[in-house]
Amino acid sequence: MLSQWFLVGAGRCGLQLARAMTAAGIEVAGIQVRSPRGRTRVRRVLPGVAALEPGDALPPVAGILLAVPDSAISSCAEGLAPRLHRATSLALHTSGLRPAADLAPLAEKGCQVGSFHPLVSFPTATGPAVPLAGVVAAVEGDAGAVLAAERLARALGIRPVRLPASAKPRYHAAAALAANMTHTVVAVARAQLVQTGLPPRLAARALRPLVIGSVEAALSARGFEKLTGPVARGDAAAVRAHLGALPGGVATAYWAVASLAVTGLAEQGLISEKQAQELVLALTRQA
């Protein structure tokens, strides 16, 4: 395990990881921030940790961890390269999509480069610490960087999984489907309940057991065998009614998700060929 790290980025991911590292006894020698607001966040949750500005001399740390937006990784690496301390031999970024090669300017300075992406949401930077025990993290890059990323993961209670850079777009898309799209669908469903007259808080409370139960069932299932509702029952009439009741954009989303469900159910023999055809017909007429 590297003795000292320097982090770049004081957003949700960067500060949550810095807090977790500090709690695990890993020294964070400083964090590079871009704004006064970022410095305030660092002081609030990590008192005693230096908040450096872009252009400041970098401390003599063994490793650098970049927690910045994907679009900023390359330019950030370019800005760090001339300031790199000779003691620094490793650089990781936290993108689940971009390859370690985005850190090429640091590799040219002799660093082993890699990526370290915890598969978890960081809703806030300064709110409750996100539990990392049991979380999976995708790692890739140079051999030395992968080993270092794995050691960092284990120190934080995270399970590292090696992925080739070519697999990262599909990996990241799967994560977005499971997290971001689920969030979107639930938010839209709550809005539809509010349109029926339920107060927003009651709508959220009403959906909670349904959503949590459904997600738990999906995660414990082999495929679609635990799916419930009209599509799983082959109820084409209910599907037509739903599509007729929903506004255009929401109906389109319903159509897309229901179409995936019909395909999965049919492929696994959970609905008959006739039911699948009737469901497809119901969806096609409303498409």
Image (tube, rainbow, N blue to C red):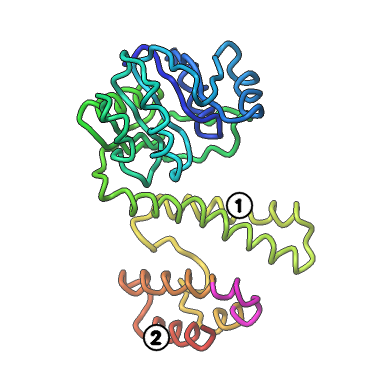
Q: Residues within 10 Å of mark 2 (few under 14, many from 20)?
A: some
Q: Amino acid at mark 2?
A: Gln
Magenta span includes 249 = yes
Element marked by disc 1 = helix
Question: Is 145 rendered above or below residue 284?
Answer: above
Question: Which residue is identified by label 2?
Answer: 277
Residue 141 appears left or right of 6: left
Residue 34 point in image, percent of width and height:
57, 30
The reply to whether the magenta stretch includes residue 272 is no
The secondary structure making up most of the magenta span is helix
**Residue at (59% x, 56% y) in the render:** 210
What secondary structure is marked by label 2? Answer: helix
Q: Is residue 235 above or below residue 201?
A: below
| Residue 37 spot, x, y in % from top left | 66, 29
Q: Which mark is residue 3?
A: none
Lateral position of residue 257 relative to residue 81, left or right: right
Kind of residue sitting beneath label 1: Pro
Q: Nearer the viewer, residue 89 or 212?
A: 89
| Quarter the N terminus occupies | top left
Badge number at residue 209: 1
| Image quadrant assignment for residue 90 | top left
Report the magenta residues as a range: 243-252
**Pick the front one: 38 or 157:** 38
